[in-house]
Image (spheres, rainbow, N blue to C red):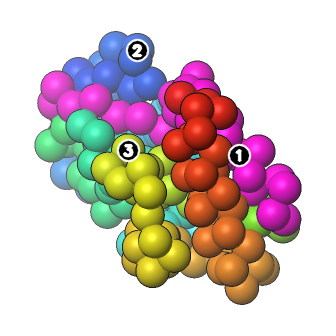
Amino acid sequence: MTAKRVSLTVNGRGENIAADGLTTLQQVLREALDYNSVKDGCTQGSCGACSVLVDGELRIACLLPAGGLQGAEVTTLEGLNARNSTSVIQQSFVEHSAAQCGFCTSGMIVSAQALLDENPAPSRDEIMEAISGNMCRCTGYLPIVEAVASAARKLAKGDGA
Ligand code: FES
Ligand code: FES
């Protein structure tokens, strides 16, 4: 299959990548660009471990054809790390033991950041809904919900962002 060149921005940096019709954004981010926060959990859209933002929207990178992303702005956890709000979320995950093996954590934090960008004071139900596409085999989810709720409270008090 013939690859075409695609120009996009990843974490604020311009990239020009080769993509054929089967190349996914997950492959580009992990294999070509070394963004290892984008996990490979299922490669079929079921686990959320590859969650990223594309033009500010939460997307599943393993289902997204890279060839259609000309001009897109992609943000991974590495790109979010420059933001105080993401540091506050990460610190809350530590404080609430919301990361155990850590495999789901980068995708969870991207989903949490996407939620708080839209809804700075989410209810627990809204947090559950926001992370419903992210599977965690370790925590039982409640510590993650607590961590996101705690981060939202801290950010509302001006402890970040
Ligand atoms: S690796 Fe993409 S959803 Fe599981
Ligand atoms: S902390 Fe292990 S899968 Fe979530």
Tell which circle, 1 or 2, labels the residue nearer the N-terminal end: 2
Q: Is 12 displayed left or right of 102 in the figure?
A: left
Residue found 49% across the figure and 39% down from its top: 76
Badge 1 element: helix
- Give the answer, above or below, for where 153 lies relative to 66: below
Ligand 1 within 8 Å, label 3 CB: no
Residue 106 visible? The answer is: no
- Give the answer, above or below, for where 47 lies relative to 116: below
Residue 130 within the segment the image draws in magenta: no
Examine the image and state in which quarter residue 75 appears.
top left
Q: CA distance from mark 1 to mark 2?
A: 23 Å
Magenta-drawn segment: 70-97
Residue found 46% across the figure and 71% down from its top: 123
Residue that badge 2 annotates: 13
Q: Is 27 displayed left or right of 135 in the figure?
A: left
Q: CA distance from mark 3 to mark 1?
A: 15 Å
Please rate how many residues cluster around mark 3, counting C-alpha atoms within 10 Å: few if below 14, some from 14 to 19, many from 20. Answer: few
Name the amino acid, label 2.
Arg
- Give the answer, above or below, for where 62 lies relative to 43: above
Image coords of residue 25 (percent x, y): 36, 46
Ligand 2 within 8 Å, label 1 CB: no
Residue that badge 1 annotates: 90
Q: As rendered, which of 33 and 2 lies closer to the eye?
A: 33
Residue that badge 3 annotates: 117
